[in-house]
Image (tube, helix red, strand yellow):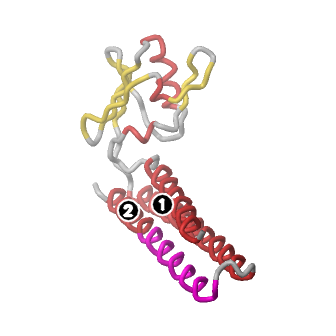
Amino acid sequence: MLNDLYKELEDKMKKAVESFKVEISKIRTGRATPAILESIRVDYYGSRIPINQIASILAPDPRLLIVQPWDQNAIGEIEKAIKSSGLGLNPQVEKGVIKIPIPPLSEERRKELIKLVQKLAEDSRVAVRNIRRDGIEKVKGLEKEKKISEDDRKMAEKKIQELTDKYIAEIDKILSNKEKEILEE
């Protein structure tokens, strides 16, 4: 019974960490990565389609992205979507591909991005702590219903806290790596 609860809580905590990873992968760091463009949707034959479903996105070097549409007729719409995305990118169409130079970040922009990443990390930590709180409530409920003993409850609370510490440490590690990436020239 408790093992099922641990597994459920751990799955939820993993999802919180994964969600954090996905969110910060979208943050532009001055280094070219295809993840920067993942949130862009393109008007394509009357539908709004994610850019990576109508084109391949390559990062041949740290300062350049190349978008290669599978349908050359979509090149104008892709360029328009990138320009209007709010990412501050300036796409250039060249021989059937779109080249996107990634400008270096200003010091002020780096500080803004670090604050944003730290806020996202704190939101993820709060999510993990809320999962812990819910788990502990369930354990206390089981003790009240006389399904587990007081010792089992204390052991379960300790195990839940260990899970929480593990996933918060993982969030902190991801945050630290992203901060270093943002500060790199």
Instruction: Name the residue located 50 percent from the left edge and 51 percent from the top edge.
Output: 23
* Image-based side of 133 in relation to 144, left or right: left
Instruction: Name the residue located 52 percent from the left edge and 30 percent from the top edge.
Output: 50
- Residue 100 appears in the figure: yes
Residue 62 in the image, given as x and y percentages of width and height: 27, 42
Instruction: Name the residue located 41 percent from the left edge and 29 percent from the top edge.
Output: 91
Q: Within 10 Å of the Cα at label 2, are there few (<14), some (14-19), or many (20+) other Cα atoms?
A: some
Quarter residue 147 falls in: bottom right
Relative height, residue 181 to residue 167 (above, below): above
Residue, far right: 145
What residue did someone put label 1 on? Answer: 117
What residue did someone put label 2 on? Answer: 179
- Magenta segment's dominant SS is helix
Badge 2 amino acid: Glu
Residue 28 in the image, given as x and y percentages of width and height: 42, 47
Quarter of the picture containing the N terminus is bottom right
- Label 1–label 2 contact, CB within 8 A: yes
Q: Earlier in the sequence, mark 1 or mark 2?
A: 1
User: In the depicted view, which residue is nearer to us: 137 or 167?
Assistant: 137
Quarter residue 106 falls in: bottom left
Q: Within 10 Å of the Cα at label 1, are there few (<14), some (14-19), or many (20+) other Cα atoms?
A: many
